[in-house]
Amino acid sequence: MTGNEMSGDAQGGIERHQYDVIVIGAGGSGLRAAIAAHEAGARVAVVCKSLLGKAHTVMAEGGCAAAMGNLYPDDNWQVHFRDTMRGGKMLNHWRMAQIHAQEAPERVMELEDWGALFDRTQDGLISQRDFGGHRYARLAHIGDRTGLEIIRTLQQRLVALGIDVYMECTVTDLLKRDGAIAGAFGYWRESGRFIVFDAPAVVLATGGFGKAWKVTSNSWEYTGDGHALALRAGATLINMEFVQFHPTGMVWPPSVKGLLVTESVRGDGGILKNSEGKRFMFDHIPDYFRKETADSIEEADRWYEDKKNNRRPPELLPRDEVARAINAEIKAGRGSPHGGVFLDIASRRTPEFIKKRLPSMYHQFKELADVDITAEPMEIGPTCHYAMGGIEVDPDTEVSVVPGLYAVGECSGGMHGSNRLGGNSLSDLIVFGRRAGDAAASYATSLPSRPEAADDDIAAAQASALAPFELEGRENPYTIQQDLQQTMNDLVGIIREGSELERALEEVERLKERAASMSVEGHRQYNPGWHLAIDLRNMLLVGECVAKAALARQESRGGHTRNDYPGPDPEWGDKNLVLRLNDDGTGVDMTEQALPAMPDDLKKFFEE
Amino acid sequence: MGYQLKMRVWRGDADGGALGDYTVEVSEGEVVLDALHRLQATQTGDLAIRWNCKAGKCGSCSAEINGKPRLLCMTRLSDFDTSETITVTPLRAFPVIRDLVTDVSYNYEKARELPSVELGPRDADGKRRMMQVDVERGQEFRKCIECFLCQNTCHVVRDHEDNKPAFAGPRFFLRYAELDMHPLDIRDRRETTRRDAGIGLCNITKCCTEVCPEGIKITDNAIIPMKERVVDKKYDPLVWLGNKIGLRNKDDDGRTEV
């Protein structure tokens, strides 16, 4: 709606636009990539499924990790790098983790240049808060609405630069010529009309795929579009078995089950208790983190004031550890009335402190659950939150194996290894968003000649998008989605087992068959049933990737826990699973691949 | 605990439409958006609704519930009697696209007219310093989720389509006020706020503040102070005289008028 004509004006035919770089997705990474590409001199457009400013980045609460050292001068990129790698159980691409830790501080400062108003320290610098897995207070934040501030800042910058945005416009296929990207094909949600972008560089910034699970903190948009578009264009996915279940999602009332409760509650002093009133996290400290975790309540409580002489409370272990512990307590029958555990900050901090530091949490519980978090504990439980897995990219340029195809943010893979630390996603977006935008612009503007999309490919993309209208009275897309969500939740959840994963794969195959005969009612204008039918294909493909990789990885590590292989296996510690579309395009093939070797000068950070 | 909820939902497009009657099963703790989603999944597959986060954070699902501008995801069914019929209609101040979805481009056009933030250079060590107390005023305004309920309810445009070109609306008065109160911004937007954004048309009835789901005190904390600053510059005889004889108003020292 900004920077372009509404599609309804063009009568007949397909609307067509030429750009150097197309960015698909308007969350933090997409907007940052578009700004970088524009500043590098490219003609760029952002294409997004929703209105500008509504992308999932608005949901990010706690903060953006960057070793700025504003509160703890000892903090630096090396410490941040080490925390990130250990949080990801060493499965991260070392180079991505390094770039991320080195560049995050400047990217945060840039947001401030563009109008972001972060909370301040006593000295007037950007304040930083504690989060799980981070050695120092490191998260730049604005209360508990950091994501909103970041997306709004980038959105306002984008508008100031006059970059074109195609809102409520969904890309359904990437177009290629001779192996390289030639553009993208999509439809306007508003009118159902088709649109073609001719562009030699496409940056995928589509986020994750949590909407394939029933209990999730993700919005409807999170259907794995970028993952699936990349697969169909010939790119590879890695780390798909690693799905982050955030330890603290709301559990009641049913309509908000899964809704995120920020980790800042724990960073700011909140503790976890079971139905017996026991602070149970002390019973769940893994050996891997024992040396750096407090083993008594007294030490844990002293840590908030004196970080030098005390170790971190176990509530601030990385998310995978905390989620598993909560899951174990609930399974052992020590859960709360609505099937979660208790998160208590009311008995530990003053109402004024809570309202000041956690205003949206206060609001969210008050409005949606009638719970006053300054007076009583919250009931929480794990919720499907983040995809560590994604498109395999070159760490320095974010280009995939397909020339002209770039990926950033949640839809890319490698940066977070097997588990992402809280606060590292917002910084991931701006660090790699900028790099991808730069690289895409330089690729597009230096090409001697541009690949041109073939008319046949455009016709095929159109036929595929319209297919759900061709059938009548068969499967309902909403029902198939619900069945997929139930399957992923039950069989590919937080704790997995070989036999269940096999069943999940069979179930996905059956759902694919049903999806082949689904039909939608109504016409093409703003028709959510049709939109879902198209997104569902992506969710099914991604669901298959996760189940397949999870079945193959016979160990437990980070966001992948196997009942039948409960511990980490060094054999698996230096391997990625790589997925690509199979030859007939109906499913995915998988191969093993060695992790890139870390140089010796970085290895020294991990010597005990 | 579940019950059959009676709903009336506006169905139609730019060419017109009507309220449709529906009955849908709902259960404890649900919000209006849950009821509409169930309707969509079971009876009206093509019912157009705009929504994203379903957590009151993105501001997409704005509509009118029993005539009141609300977020569908933050309106609990328990606020209504179980026998009551809930009527849902699209935002009235914007053109309908389909069913509950409206064309809100007016707001995106107004966003483009606003002179963007412009900060001076960073401190010598590459950082910037601002005190918490100074950023807090702007932070209140930046809580805005752009649901545009304030824009929809503001009678300057709600009942007077012809005012739209000359009036940016409460959402953007928040922005002008935020930038005016930014400790490090170097632009003076007071004249733009008056001339281009039309802040003078607002007669502070506070309807915008009433509907704000973020509880931002739009009128008291943004519009009124901004009006005062605009008026001081434009109409205060002492300021006028000061300007005339070369005495500068220190208040906007270092800011450049845009």
Image (cartoon, coloured by chain):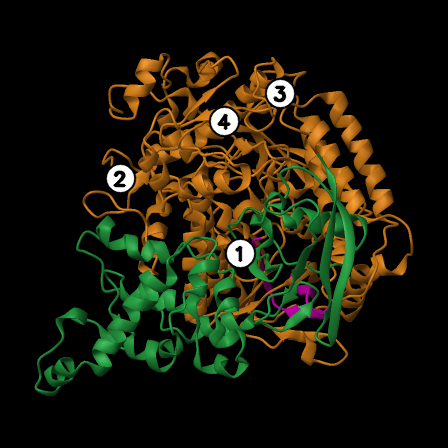
Chain colours: A orange, B green
Element at label 4: loop
- The residue carrying mark 3 is A555
Q: CA distance from mark 4 to mark 3?
A: 12 Å
Q: CA distance from mark 4 to mark 2?
A: 25 Å
Tag 1 subunit: B
Magenta-drawn segment: A180-205
Q: Nearer the viewer, residue B145 or A234?
A: B145
Snapshot quadrant of residue A303: top left
Q: CA distance from mark 4 to mark 1?
A: 37 Å
From this view, report whether residue A375 is shown above or below residue A11: above
Residue type, numbered disc 2: Gly
Does A74 sit left or right of A45 as displayed? left
Quadrant location, the C terminus of chain B: bottom left
- The residue carrying mark 2 is A69
Q: Which mark is residue B59?
A: 1
Q: Nearer the viewer, residue A86 or B96?
A: B96
